[in-house]
Image (spheres, rainbow, N blue to C red):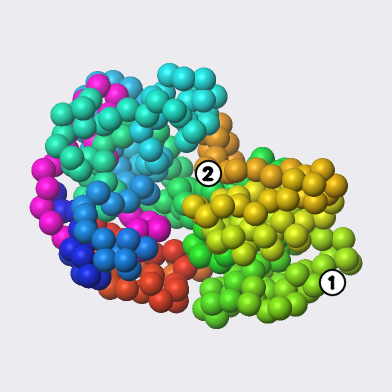
């Protein structure tokens, strides 16, 4: 099969790897759509490698035993390789599993065959394959991963509704998906983004206001927009300390905030000011509970027009270099690859 590879120094292409095979409850999926995510950061830094991707949607190509899916089923491939047996997995919070398994050890497929989604085939446990309703396209269904998934999970935990004003920092594809999630629930969404293309796209997707974080008066403007009270709830999708601090400062007393954007820098949280005297509830939110999958699919079914705006570009996987180069500029929303073109 063909897989996308990074060759270093901003170069990329395709390579041949062994076709993976199913085994036990690991199912072979023919990938039809590859939503691109944060891999571009490795491309930008000159990374080399062929173990790329964590989002995919396609159809079941082969199974090793009867199970939860059958050949021909259209499915979304959920991320990670959780154990499926611990309390977290059994409760639907598999993303936080502490006992993830090695798919290559179980299936016998040589790395990275089967565990990279920038590929024509992937193998995954059958219980991590979400069925795609007949009226939803494979491309739209792929947004059930990082396009809509992280912010959907955060908003589920915070119970965002039509009474809320929600701040979302960072209008990359995840944050843009958050605009769809928030407005779908009837909330008033204030977006924070300085990149012109993405700021404009946030407005098209329904953000009531878009604020440039480089503006020295950004916090004051947010407070003015909320009558001096602050937003009810907030989601950080930018993953930088400055955006996290702006989010925390912008939330009203007794409000809630969720960290979604990955950040490895220390978090500047003030115990007295932020927790005790302001009474904030802060959430870490990586993905969503599997029990809520049908609700997310319902949103996807009702938001087809806005998903067509969120997915700004499509490339054959043979042109993955051009796709990553575009992502580096920021002049895009979600990009989807076709691994068979």
Circle 2 packing at 10 Å, graded few (<14), some (14-19), many (20+), is: many
Disc nearer the start of the sequence (1/2)? 1
Position of 258 relative to 226 (above/below): above
* Highlighted range, magenta: 14-40
Q: Residues within 10 Å of mark 1 (few under 14, many from 20)?
A: few
**Residue at position x 47%, y 68% from top?**
333
Q: Is residue 44 left or right of residue 14?
A: right
Relative to 59, residue 184 above or below: below
Residue name at image x 30 percent, y 42 percent: 59
Q: Which mark is residue 224?
A: 1
Q: Is residue 76 visible?
A: yes
Q: Is residue 307 visible?
A: no
235 left or right of 253 in image: left
Residue 70 sits above or below residue 187 on the image: above
Rendering quarter of residue 190: bottom right
Residue hosting label 2: 286
Residue 120 location (% of width, % of height): 21, 50
The x and y percentages for residue 13 are: 18, 64
Q: Position of residue 260 (x, y in %)?
A: 56, 51
Query: Looking at the image, which residue is at 72% across and 70% down?
Result: 208
What is the C-alpha distance between the residues marked 1 and 2? 31 Å
- As for residue 322 lying within the magenta part, the answer is no
């Amino acid at each position: 099969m063909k897989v996308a590879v990074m060759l270093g120094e901003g170069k990329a292409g395709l390579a041949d790897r062994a076709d993976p095979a199913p085994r036990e409850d690991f199912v072979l999926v023919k990938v039809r759509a590859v939503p691109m995510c944060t891999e571009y950061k490795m491309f930008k830094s000159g990374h080399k490698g062929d173990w790329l991707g964590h989002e995919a949607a396609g159809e079941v190509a082969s199974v090793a035993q009867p199970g939860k899916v059958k050949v021909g089923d259209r499915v979304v491939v959920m991320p990670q390789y959780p154990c499926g047996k611990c309390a977290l997995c059994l409760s639907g919070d598999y993303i936080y599993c502490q006992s993830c398994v090695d798919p290559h050890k179980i299936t016998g497929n040589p790395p990275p065959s089967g565990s990279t989604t920038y590929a024509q085939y992937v193998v995954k446990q059958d219980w991590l394959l979400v069925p795609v309703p007949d009226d939803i396209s494979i491309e739209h269904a792929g947004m059930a991963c990082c396009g809509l998934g992280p912010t959907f999970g955060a908003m589920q935990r915070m119970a965002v509704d039509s009474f809320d004003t929600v701040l979302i920092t960072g209008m990359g594809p995840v944050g843009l998906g958050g605009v769809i999630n928030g407005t779908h629930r009837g909330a008033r969404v204030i977006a924070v983004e300085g990149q012109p293309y993405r700021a404009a796209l946030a407005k098209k997707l329904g953000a009531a206001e878009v604020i440039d974080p480089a503006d020295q008066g950004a916090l004051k403007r947010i407070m003015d927009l909320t009558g001096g009270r602050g937003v009810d709830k907030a989601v950080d999708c930018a993953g930088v300390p400055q955006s996290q601090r702006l989010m925390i400062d912008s939330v009203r007393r007794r409000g809630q905030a969720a960290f979604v954007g990955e950040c490895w820098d220390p978090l500047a949280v003030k115990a007295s000011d932020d927790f005790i005297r302001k009474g904030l509830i802060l959430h870490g939110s990586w993905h969503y509970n599997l029990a809520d999958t049908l609700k997310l699919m319902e949103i996807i079914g009702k938001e087809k027009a806005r998903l067509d705006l969120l997915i700004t570009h499509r490339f054959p996987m043979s042109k993955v270099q051009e796709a990553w180069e575009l992502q580096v500029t920021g002049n895009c929303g979600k990009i989807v690859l076709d691994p068979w073109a």
